[in-house]
Each structure stands twice: as C-alpha cells, then as structure tokens.
Image (cartoon, grey):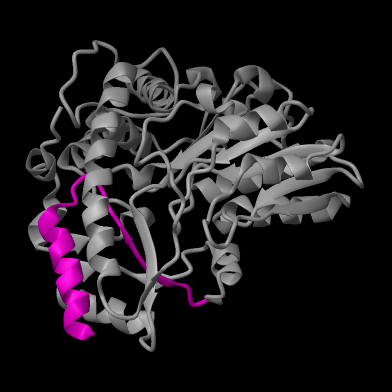
Amino acid sequence: MSYNVEEVRSHFPALSSGIAFFDGPGGSQVPRQVGEAIAAAITAPISNRGTITKSEQNAEAIVNGFRSAVADLVDGDPAGVVYGRSWTQLTYDFSRNLSKQWSQGDEIIVSRLDHDSNIRPWIQAAEKVGAVVKFAEFDLESTELTPEVIGNLLSDKTKLVAVTGASNVLGTRPNLAAISKLVHQSSALFYVDGVHLTPHAPVSMREFGADFYGFSAYKIFGPHCAALVAAPELLETIKNDKLRPSTMVVPERFEFGTLPYELMAGVTAAIDFIADLAPGASASRRGRIVNSMKVLEEYEVNLFEELQRGILALPGVTSYGHAANRTPTLFFNFKGLDSGAVYRHLATKLVNAPASNFYALESSLALGLGEQGALRAGLAPYSTQEDVERLISGIAELL
C-alpha cells in the first residue's frame, strides 16, 4: 500500500511556512485536528472529574479517552496508563518510587545509548540508597547494543534494566524482545524509553516484554506531555508520596493535581490521526494504528536511503549511526567545519537540521564528539523527497 505524503501534509498548518523540518526527533509539527481538539476541550463545559454534572462527565470522558488511545498505540492496558508532564518527569517520579524498594548493593543497568532522561534519574536514585549502576556499552563501530552486553551485566542483584527503544541520535533500535527475555530470567524490571521509537514503527510493549514503556506526545503530533504504561498489577506494588485526601487507586495514584484535560484530548486526537495515516481495513483503532505505522515505516525507510546516500556523498562527511535496524535518523558532521555553522546556514535556507548532543550525552562522549555533538537530520511522516534535496543542496552550497 502506498503512502500519500501530500495528503498527510495537507493537515499541518506549519508546513505552509515553507520550512523543511528535519528536527522531528526533537518534536513534531502538529496537525490541525489536534489543535481543534485542544481548543474544543478547553472551551467546553469542564470541571473536576465526576459523573454528576455535564462538565464532570466531559472531564471523565477525556481522561478515559486518553488512557484508551495510549493503550491502543503501545498495545498496553488502559488501566495502566499514567499521564505525565514530560517523559523526564515520569522517569524521575518512577525512579524515586521504585528505589524505595532497593537496598545497598543492589544493581541497576543503564545504557550508554540512551537519552540522559533514561540514565541520570536512575543514577541519582541509586546513589541515594547505595545501589550500584552498571553501564551497558554499545559497539562504537556498529553502534549496536546487543542483548549479550546486557546479559553479561545481569546478576541476582539486578533490580532494573533501563534501555531505549531507539537512540535519538544514532537511530539504533536494540532487540528489546531478546533483552527482555534475559532481564526476566532474573527478578529485574525492564524499563523502556520509547520516545524516539514510537513515532517511527508499530509498537507492542507486550511483544517487547517491557514492564514499563513510555513516550512523549509531542514527538507524535501531540501537545507537550507524556505517558507511561505498565500492567496495573505492577503499578499496585509501587507506593508513592501523595496528599492525604488524594486517591491511591491505580493509575491515578501517580498523577498529581487536576489533570490538563485539554492536553489529554490533544493526545487522543494525535493518536487518532496516526490511526488514519494510511487507509486500512481494520475496524479497531489498534489495528489501524499498526497498519498505518507499517506503511509509514516503509515510506521512511526508502526516503532515508536517499537522504543517507546524498549526505554521505558530500566531501569530508562522517556519519555515526550504522546499526542494521534503526530509525530514519542521521547523526553526522564535516571535517574542519563547525556543526553549529552548518545548522545556522541551513536555517537561512528554511531547513531545520539542528546540531547538539540532544541530551544523548553519553553517546556523544563515547563517540568522541564531546558535549558539542553533531548535526542531526531526522525524517517525519510529512518529510518529502524535495525536503531531502533541499537539505543536501543547502549543505553542499556551504561546503
């Protein structure tokens, strides 16, 4: 089935600016439907959740709709969907909560491949209780993170393994299912950062064997917030600090204050938009999501081949991502040329391809790029052949 990128693009007001957006890994543009859903929710009768008044019912329906949509997106349980202001905030919250069950000498495994939001919270939580943190290293040549590396670090003291679904700079997609099998041979929990994977491939946290899986909504056409998903039974075992009158019912136990109903409505609209990216025969939203993401993934793989071929043909270029299974994300620089200068030049051509370590600090340092990092060009569902040509010609002009 073909992917109609022009039809998809027609829903994004920001694309009328003429900008070619390669900064999707840092945040996507937003379709009109999402903005309308946010506006409708915040201007309709609304109040604290309940079942008596119309405004209470509206709030309740929005929250339940959000949980159902997120569950469909990641193949989880709606009763285990936790709303969060950001993925970083959620990981900090759960690192503090889970570490209450850790003791001195327990072990935590994190990956050098990860965004710092799936590294630092665990390190800081471990330090407070005297737990030991072990780093899983990725291969610098292939940029692969193999299950064997994780397996060699596991012991009967391991409490948690935190691994990305895809590197936000290198694109590397570790074999989550294989890693999960090793993790669950022990009594450890498997915490997966799906922020960069979720926009580019069908996701099933059940197939991955993830105990915790989450993503940022603003990477998938939604507003600035996030969600974490786990089995309700697992969430029941985790205690956290709460105000005395507030509920300890899961998943509300992990959500504080009045929820931002308008943002939750926006997330639901974004997921509904994803479900309809490509026409499909499935009647269920989950089925339509899987179909759309498969079609999108094929489109992005083909377009990425052209992007990569064009960039690698330029003089003095070094590319840093070489994994066999990866997202359409290119991390690269040019000999003798400051990446920031390329970034600024491209901006004058209305091409957004920023330069940084993008919070993948451990990856950047391991690759010898320091804190400066390199250029990153990532495809999004609205990226086109013309966008790719503009990026390549813009860099070639500067060179």
Could you tell me which residue is drawn at 65 percent across and 43 percent down?
Answer: 162
Q: Quadrant of the C terminus?
A: bottom left
Can residue 348 be spotted in the picture?
Answer: yes
Q: Nearer the viewer, residue 199 or 43?
A: 199
**Which quarter of the picture shows residue 60?**
top left
Q: How many marks?
A: 0
x and y percent of residue 115 in the render? 54, 56
Q: Is residue 234 above or below residue 197?
A: above
Residue 260 position in % (x across, y down):
41, 38
Q: In this picture, which residue range is highlighted in magenta?
A: 371-399
Determine if the magenta segment contains residue 379: yes
Most foreground residue, 218 or 275 = 275
Q: Which residue lies at the image location 69% right of the left edge and 46% below the top edge?
A: 149
Horizontal side of residue 317 vs 390, given as left or right: right
User: Left or right: where does residue 267 sit relative to residue 230?
Assistant: left
Looking at the figure, which quarter contains the N terminus? top left
Q: Is residue 189 left or right of residue 220?
A: right
Question: Which residue lies at the image location 28% right of the left edge and 44% below the top edge?
Answer: 301
Residue located 47% across and 73% down the image: 373
Residue 350 shows in the view:
no
Q: Residue furthest bottom?
A: 336
Q: Looking at the picture, does residue 200 appear above or below residue 20? A: above
Compared across the picture, whether 345 is left or right of 86 comes to left
Q: Is residue 43 above or below residue 380?
A: above
Q: In the rendering, at what x and y percent does residue 255 appear?
A: 56, 34
> In the rendered image, which quarter is residue 244 located in?
top right
109 falls in the magenta region: no
| Nearer to us in this view, 79 or 370 | 370
Coordinates of residue 172 in the picture (x, y in percent): 47, 50
